[in-house]
Image: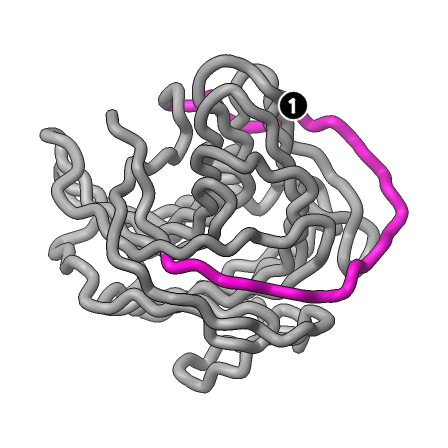
Amino acid sequence: MDRRVGIVALAIATAVNAACSLLVDTDGLGGTPASTDGDAAPSSTGTDAGSIDAPAGDGASPADATTDAPAADAGPPCVGAAWFCDDFEGLFGAKWSSNEASGGAALRVGDAKTGAFAMQAQVEAMPGGRYANLIRTLDAVPSRVACDFDLKLTAVPTAGEIDVFVLKRVAGDKTHGVYLASFDGTWGIYELLETNMGASVDRGATTALAPPQGQWMHLRFETDFDALSLAVNGAPIATLSGLTPLAGATTSHLALGLPYVSGSQSASLLVDNLACALGP
């Protein structure tokens, strides 16, 4: 399948947050991958959306009053079915439905932004697309989702596609996904509608901005499935409106880490303080 990506890009600057390292390999703790490319998403080139410079920050939460979900650093309640949270301080992967890692890839605990541990996803340079991610099947199909999390990119290829966050809903033979991804060194958000005949909707917009590496940043990924938005360190960065409707969705899941890395290249990142508010 053709892998071209549509992206709304962002530029981010933030301070480096150093932490002690404790690596515990957890390969083999999760389920068996269902496919050879994890939650990979083919994508298409859209129009140029331009760029918005985000101010430097310390991982503060995005200032967004459109949902009831506070940022992870603000101490969200994380109680009940309306929340899914993980600070990665407990048993690694215990709150998730499965851990998936292809050959030459690994999921581990790693350097944290706060506390002792974070999630580390790492893919080695090997032929073919690779993935290393946690997957959570949601208890109910939400009508809106607002996820806050801290992210530090430690190695990002300068070519190809890297998916970091994927949220999918399934209705019969149709799957609608919204994504946070990097393509050829630029960031973006986009949507993809797939059927058993292939992709029917695949769109976004692109710029030529490079993502930072070695720096913690705070992201807010929010959608009501009519529009999709991204904020970084409190600054709104990108919006994709007019999302394709999907009626009758029966299941939904999210994937976090490295759901897909294209080509024969390595990649690694850290994620901490995930807090997702799930609307009914």
Q: Is residue 144 visible?
A: no
Q: How is the image coloured?
A: one colour
The x and y percentages for residue 76 are: 60, 73
Quadrant location of the C terminus?
bottom left
Give me the residue at 59% from left, 58% from top. 274
Q: Is residue 120 visible?
A: yes
Determine which residue is flagged by label 1: 27
Q: Is residue 177 left or right of residue 95?
A: left
Give me the residue at 50% from left, 29% from top. 131
Looking at the rendered structure, the kind of residue marked 1 is Asp
What span is in magenta?
A: 8-34
Give me the residue at 14% from left, 59% from top. 245
Secondary structure beneath dot 1 equals: loop
Give me the residue at 74% from left, 39% from top. 109
The x and y percentages for residue 38 are: 41, 29
Say above or below: 19 vs 278: above
Principal SS element in the magenta part? loop
| Residue 28 sits inside the magenta stretch | yes
Say above or below: 77 vs 265: below
Query: Which one is in front, 213 or 271?
Result: 213
| Residue 234 sits inside the magenta stretch | no
- Residue closest to the far bottom: 65
The x and y percentages for residue 225 are: 26, 64
Q: Quadrant of residue 154?
A: top right
Q: Quadrant of residue 99?
A: top right
Q: Is residue 115 left or right of residue 96?
A: right
Classify 10 Å Cα crowding around label 1: few (below 14), some (14-19), many (20 and above): some
Say above or below: 230 vs 254: below
- Residue closest to the far right: 20
Quadrant location of the N terminus?
top left
Q: Is residue 214 left or right of residue 72?
A: right
The x and y percentages for residue 64 are: 48, 82
